[in-house]
Image (tube, coloured by chain):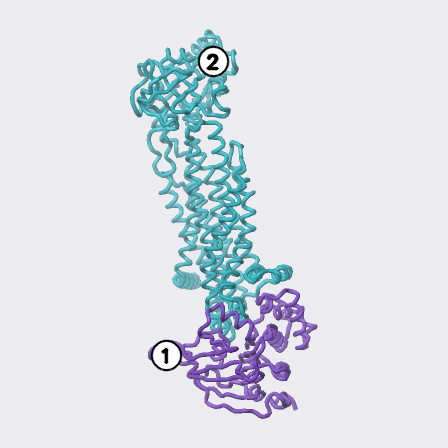
Amino acid sequence: MTMIDGESVLRARGLRKEYGKGEALVRAVDEVSLDVAAGETVAVMGPSGCGKSTLLHLLGGLDRATGGEVWLAGQSLGRLGERALARLRRDAVGFVFQAFHLMDELTAAENVELPALLAGRSPRAARRRAAELLERIGLADRAGFLPAALSGGQRQRVAIARALVSDPLVVLADEPTGNLDSEATLEVLRLFESLHAAGQTLVIVTHDSRIAATAGRLISMRDGAFVDETRLTGGTTGNLGALAGLEG
Amino acid sequence: MGKIFLVGRLAARDLRHRPAQAVLLLLAITAATAVLTLGLALHGVTSQPYQQTRAATNGPDVVAQLGGPAAGLQGPGQVNPRQQVLTEVRALVHASGVIGHSGPYPVTAAVLRTRGITAQVMAEGRDPKSASLDQPALTQGGWVRDGGVVIERTFADALDVSTGDRITLNGRSFTVTGIAVTAANPPYPNLCNTGCQFDTANAQIPAGASPGLIWLTQADARSLATGPPSYVLNLKLKDPARAQAFASAGGGSNPAGITMSGLIPWQSIAAADGLLIQDEQQVLTPGAVLAGLLALASVAVLAGGRMAEHTRRIGLLKAVGGTPGLIAVVLLAENLVLALLAAGAGLAAGWLAAPLITNPGAALIGSPGAPSLTPSIVFKVVAVALVVALAATLVPAIRAARTSTVSALANAARSPRRRAALIAISARLPVPLLLGLRLVARRPRRAVLSAASIAVTVTGIVAVLAFHTTVGLRTSEAAHGLANPVAARDEQMLQVLTVVLVALAILNAVFTAWATALDAKRASALARALGSTPRQVTAGISAAQVIPALTGALLGVPLGIGLFAAANHAGIVTIPPASWLTAAVLGTLLAVAVLTSIPARIGARSPVAEILQAETA
């Protein structure tokens, strides 16, 4: 999906997500507003349970908001039915999860091509695109490996390749390095760097300051609300590993 | 003792947590054991009504058929000379052990016509006054008189005639003066089961038609005969229990030293009277096997599905010190207790239902009541229930016992199987089939169970269709619209069995879809996160049931025809029309798709974010 320059890829206004009622009411996301421009990398940071993941799910149309509105590629998610929402997700969003969520019984290549097949692409085109992406992330030689035979970092790179297979407008990453060791974290950071350089819009939710430091804009979140926003000059254009304190 | 108490408490708690599943499992095994109880309990249930009829009609101990084909002189123009029959009669009535007799009565074949029905009859000439031995008991009207006939009750029911109706015999008109039952002959359509006294081949009657019995005056019987008649002689023995030995010895040491072959002991007639029930047994026994197999599939799917649902609980039990053995025993104990309860319920249901299907028919008077449940029947039924539960639970129980505590605590799904060929094929299919085939490939054992369940059901349905086709053809060719009480009973049994099989198959389809939806929860959520619509995921989960169901349904067609051929001792099997078989297969697939769409829809609409988030936690 292509994006018109100058427009927000993703926009949220007064976004709310509530659970429970009365005294048991919990506001997981509380009046959040956000604009993400094309090619921008935004990091949302906060402690565990502050509502980061819930926000990401709302932005990607995985969950419905209690109030407020989200526009993705100019379309209001609240007004879309389940089918239209699924199509929008398929065409405009790539998800990267902390737990990778790869299909255990599928090889790396089969996992990467899956969204393309679900989108109705031909098996040949889907496989070609998967091969390109695996090449790009440096795992071409692991294309036929099952997830169980890959390291944590390799699994997450496969998951990122899967998120990219449909050329999404925005990649939403939920704690992408949460399950990884330092070396694997570095592998993933480098990959995000190359994506950013290629103009891919990224929204990364994390509680790891090293990851957050790599973004162009850092938003701090607490108790479901945005409490601070900082533009980072270093951003993803610098030496990521050094910036993140992962290499000398 | 403490361990048993712990296992009992854990099993009871778990059962209380899943009452719906426990009830469904109970129903599945109860249905199978009830059918099995019925099949086992039917043995010999007609003996009591036969004895009542024998007493009411002063039934003979041995019936001698003289001068007909049963005596070995079959064929046109080959009738015993009258003198020879008289010699035989004298020899028999004076034979050792014979203390009374009635007859000989002339018997002839005749063609009966009424209301467009043509049938062959065995017309037995009788005196207007009552006989001392074998006086048929009238259930309607009066005894024979000139121009008036009495018809055996089963045959009258098949003809749909009653007293006062007119019939013709060999073109002569007669009035039906009465309807009666006898213990001296098997009823329609098994009259010739103990041997016929006349040549059943008749140009006016279609081949294979079963004759019925009527009584009329001796003068009328003789007037119908186209040649010298055959005769029937009823004998009373001093010791009725020796009737079989008497018949086997050909009349024993009669003074004339004549060896007779047309001697029928009352035990053979009683056995032929029980054919109606025997036929039911022939239907119920394979039916019980089919129902048992379905129950096995139900329990296996339920136990497996529950495993997926309770992984975390298993992890908790292990974490607090539960040994793998304890985990397996708890799961086994739950299902074995349910199986025992189901066996009890099945025995009770079968015992209570038996009188509904053990009606001896119109041929006999009296009722058999509820059959006795012998220790052997109880043992067999309980054993089958326990074996079903054990066989179905063993694999999931062992798997639960061997699950790693850490992965169980993390509620990790059991690793799916990889089937590279299926994955490659599925890539070329539309999204619902892609998802469905991959779900099938993930859990091949469940797919096999699902296919087997549908195969068993379609086997039953096709056997019923084969029965209808065969009986329909036989009826239209042979009986000219004459109702066949045996076929009617069989049909009734088959209908009941079909309902049981279909009900069990419905349970299985729903269980399997539920288990698949549960197992595929994460995969479905992920597919939706990657852009599949809920409808595609629903259709995918349904397709995962329909794909093995298609294999099962196709397999069920030859199996059903084979089952009917094996169960049908008559040996005549007609393959149902292709349109019926196609409808059976397509109807089954449609039913599976509709039934599984409900759990599939629920599974496909579970909140994606929640499921994926739970995996992360």
Position of residue B401 measured from the top left corner of the image (x, y, whole percent): 52, 64
Position of residue B407 measured from the top left corner of the image (x, y, whole percent): 53, 70
Q: Is residue A16 left or right of residue B453?
A: left
Camera-side residue of B124 and B210: B210
Residue A192 vertical position relative to residue B264 in the rendered view, above or below: below
Residue A34 vertical position relative to residue B107 in the rendered view, above or below: below
Camera-side residue of B242 and A153: A153
Chain coloured purple here: A
Residue that badge 2 annotates: B67
Q: Secondary structure at mark 1?
A: loop
Chain coloured cyan here: B
Image mark count: 2
Q: What amino acid is at disc 1?
A: Leu
Camera-side residue of B593 and A80: A80
Residue that badge 1 annotates: A25
Q: Is residue A150 left or right of residue A58?
A: right
Bin the neighbour count of mark 1 within 10 Å (Cα to Cα): few under 14, some 14-19, many 20 and up. few
User: Which chain does tag 1 point to?
Assistant: A
> Which residue is depicted at the point 56% across and 51% down?
B551
